Every structure is written in structure tokens, then in C-alpha cells.
Amino acid sequence: MVDEPLVIKASAGAGKKRRADSSLTREKILVTSVRLFSESGFDGASMRAIADVAGVNLASMNYHFGSKVQLFEAAIEYSAAPINARRIRQLDALEAAQGLPTVAQLVRAFVDVDIIGGDLAWPQLSARILAEPSNLSERLLERAFSPTVQRFLQALQCSLPHLDPAQLGLRFLFCGRRNAASGSL
């Protein structure tokens, strides 16, 4: 009689459960990192502190995010996502309405995002981001908001066809710099 190798079969739901657990772990890390980066800044929030508060091990943080810079970037993108989504919804509604949106309507759609009432600590995190070295913060803010900004610039160009695109971009940039704590560039 030949001994057959022992084969352990995983249940069909095991893979789904692991993916769900992995998603929950990732979410816990993101929520915790937003809070700790908001409170302590990039340098003040260690990977170990984030792992401890999130109740995960350091290896899972490295698995999900790699480096601290990548985690910081993910935290910014995670916080920016609801702001960008609201802006795009408002822009889509304006573009779907009859007629060309006015500049005032476009600016309002970009600025009026009600971030103060949200669960995420975006106002505090954005202040911390702006206090970080510009070589880190500018790149991360650009990456988080650039696609949304580009959509608004296209819409503004339609409403202001007489303006040179470079001039429009510069005006938008200065408008955004004044409103950085509101989630703009």
C-alpha cells in the first residue's frame, strides 16, 4: 500500500475571509495613520506607534504599505478621496445641467466640500502636510488632487476661453494656495 500525501483543502470561503481581513487591516492602518499623522506630523508618528494604536503588527503595515513615506501618501490619498469625490460629483452635476457653468459655479463646486463635518481629520492633516518639507508635501498633495484639479481646469477653460491655459492654471494655483486647508492645492 502506497502512502498518499496528506492534502489539506481550504474551504471555499477561506480566501474571501482572508481578503476581507486584509481589507479591514488596511482600513484600520489608514484610519489610525491619518489620526497620528494629523496629531504628530510625519516625523512624530512612527510606524511602530501606528501599528500599536491600530492593533496590528509591523509586518502587516510593511505588507500593505511598504515604507513610511508610502503610508503617509496613502493616508493623504485616503483623506483626499471623499473631498475629490464630492468635487467631481458637483462638477458632473454642473456639466449635466443645461448650459455652460459659470466661473462662480465652478469655483463654488471646488471650494464647497463640507470637510469640517467629516469623520476624517483632513483640516488638521492638511495643516501638518503644509508644515512638512515642501519636497515631500507638494508632491503628495499634487498626486492626491491633480486629477480633480485637471477636470476643473478643463471646465474653467471652457468658461474662460479667452484666457491662456497657462495663465488660467496659474490663477487656479494661487486660488488653491489660499485655500490649501480646505483640501485644495
Image (cartoon, rainbow, N blue to C red):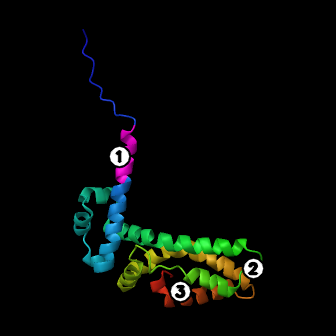
| Camera-side residue of 170 and 75 | 75
Asked whether residue 66 appears in the rendered view, the answer is: no
Image coordinates of residue 167 in percent, x first then y, are 64, 89
Query: Which amino acid type is marked by label 1?
Result: Arg
Disc 2, disc 1: CB below 8 Å? no
- Amino acid under label 2? Leu
Residue marked by disc 2: 100
Mark 3 lies on a secondary structure that is helix
Q: Residue at x 72, y 83 (%)?
A: 159
Residue 7, located in which quarter of the rendered image?
top left
Element carrying mark 1: helix
Vertical comparison of 107 with 26: above or below: below
**Which of the numbered marks, if any, corresponds to residue 176?**
3
Query: How far is mark 3 from mark 2, CA to CA?
Result: 22 Å
Q: CA distance from mark 1 to mark 3?
A: 41 Å
Q: Position of residue 92 (x, y in %)?
A: 65, 71
The disc placed on residue 18 is 1
Q: Residues within 10 Å of mark 2 (few under 14, many from 20)?
A: some
Horizontal placement of 173 versus 122: left or right?
A: right
Q: Main secondary structure of the magenta part?
A: helix
Q: Is residue 166 magenta?
A: no
